[in-house]
Image (spheres, rainbow, N blue to C red):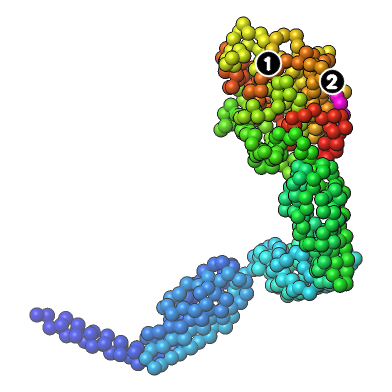
Amino acid sequence: MNYRLYIAGIAAMLCLGSCEDDDKTAPLEANMKCDRTEVAAGETVCFMDRSSGNPARWDWTFEGGEPATSQLFSPEVVYTRPGTYSVTLRVGRGDNNSEKVFSSLITVAYPDEVSADFEADKLNAYNTDDVTFTDLSAGFPNTWEWTFTTAEGVSVTSTEQNPVMKFVPGVYTVTLKASSPKSTSTVTKENYLNVIDHDAVAAEFGTSTPLMIIAGETVTFEDRTMGRPEQWSWEFEGADTPTSTERNPTVRYSSPGRFKVKMTANNEINTSTCEKDAYVMVLPSAGLKMWFPFNGNLQDMSPNKDIVMKEHSSDPSKWSIKLDSPSRHDGDCSAQLAGVCKTNTDDYAVLQIANPEQLPGGMQPMTFVMWVKADKSLGTKLGLFQRGRPANSTGSDGMYDANNKDQNQSWARLNSTASSTEGFARWYVNATGQGSACSANTTDKSLLDDEWHCIVFVKEFADGKCVTKIYADGELGAKSTAQTAKDTTKDPFFIGCTTQVTKAKPDVTHPQINVPFIGLIDDVMMYDRSFTADEVKTLYDIMK
């Protein structure tokens, strides 16, 4: 055995043990170091214990840091807000403790830019309400200058970050100037806050039901008065019950027309009146067999509500009808048809009546109403509707027959220009056998001008003869020469196109689509009686 090496090893062990004992008994004194003391907002600092006395416990406190405390030997801390922050370390072993504060140790720098923004917890308030503004500025501003100014020049200010304030009545423009040591940003929101007197009354009303109804139906009115109304006085022109003191009355209208509504609201201090002329639109009910207002759906809103309309598309994945398109009245919708406007097209989305046998046709008088909006740039001809069986279709089954020239149909379309044979609007009504057609053609103006137009088709009978008339925007545009009345087929009935049967598409129930209507269609209606010129004008005035 090498005794010298053995003795040296024993000596080293004794020495080491003596050193450890010395460290454990050394005074406990908190100390630490960190990997950096200057960071940008959002960066991390790593802290490491360097205390003497062999501590067994660590309690860190990080001013401005996340986390704010830690019991780890070497914690990592994120600083998200600019500023200068202290760190406190308290260490312990047994009953002994030591604490040290490292004042202003960590400096978190401000970003180079500030972007001012804010929001309020309410935009309409009474003068008795607290309004809370919340600073949403980016870039860690540390000063704020708020200015609240009315149109009359009255201003109030605040330097709080998130001020809570009351205001005298008025409409306020709000400006926030947010600043940091490195940057300043200002944002202004015009007419942002509306403050009204708690005792004020500003009368306003609307409806929870449609404003266009059929005679005999009701409208429910909603009080929307600002302020503190306590009493209400309503006046309903044309209604069955002309007055009401209810807050939200329901009123029946039995006579067609367009009627004014007036409402006065008051409390013990103030009174206010709101009046809306030609507000309620009441359509005539006598003889109404279908009405499609297209307010988001394909539901018949006539008294019987039994006519079924469906979408007829060449390719539903490519062409569809939008039922939420804008109409001529605020809040109302229309149907937007689509496709390629040309003869014999296979690109279309039009409409079809599924049970046309329930609608007047053939030898029956009728009034057919359509509101349309289209641009001539969409096509030189746009189909409006087609009903019955065209040439080359047999009368028995509606299938293609090249030798059958008898037409049993009615169709209408719009043209961008008028010719000697066709007007701007044309309605062609044929019957079994050639030479008995009623053809009405308007010549006064184009209806393809990207404006809403009301087109009314009236068919009337007298002394065994049929006469057809076209009205455009309440005025007679064309009238056909009387022809001997003959029956026509009611089925099929397409809206937004004309049709034909061909060798390639021989079935009249799935015909070849011609010149589909590319544009908006609204309020498609049919009555089982012939309207007079005065009735057409009245209907137009109600619906326009």
Q: Is residue 190 left or right of residue 23?
A: right
Q: In the figure, 194 relative to 103: above or below?
A: above
Q: Amino acid at mark 2?
A: Lys
Does any portion of residue 493 appear in the rendered image? yes
Q: Check if mark 1's residue and mark 2's residue have beta carbons within 8 Å.
A: no
What is the quadrant of residue 244 in the picture? bottom right
Question: In terms of depth relative to the viewer, which is nearer, 27 or 93?
Answer: 93
The residue that mark 2 highlights is: 479
Q: Is residue 476 left or right of residue 211?
A: right
Q: Residue at x 41, y 93 (%)?
A: 96
The local secondary structure at tag 2 comes to strand
Q: Residue at x 70, y 38 (%)?
A: 302
Q: In the figure, 111 relative to 499: above or below?
A: below
The x, y position of residue 243, in whole percent, is 84, 57
For the N terminus, give its image quadrant.
bottom left
What is the quadrant of residue 371 in the picture? top right
The x, y position of residue 47, in whole percent, is 47, 75
The residue that mark 1 highlights is: 408
The local secondary structure at tag 1 comes to strand
Please say whether residue 292 is one of the residues in the magenta stretch: no
The x, y position of residue 367, in whole percent, is 77, 29
Magenta residue span: 474-478
| Disc assigned to residue 356 | none
Q: Amino acid at mark 1?
A: Asn
Question: In terms of depth relative to the viewer, which is nearer, 193 or 91?
Answer: 193
Spot the residue most to the left: 1
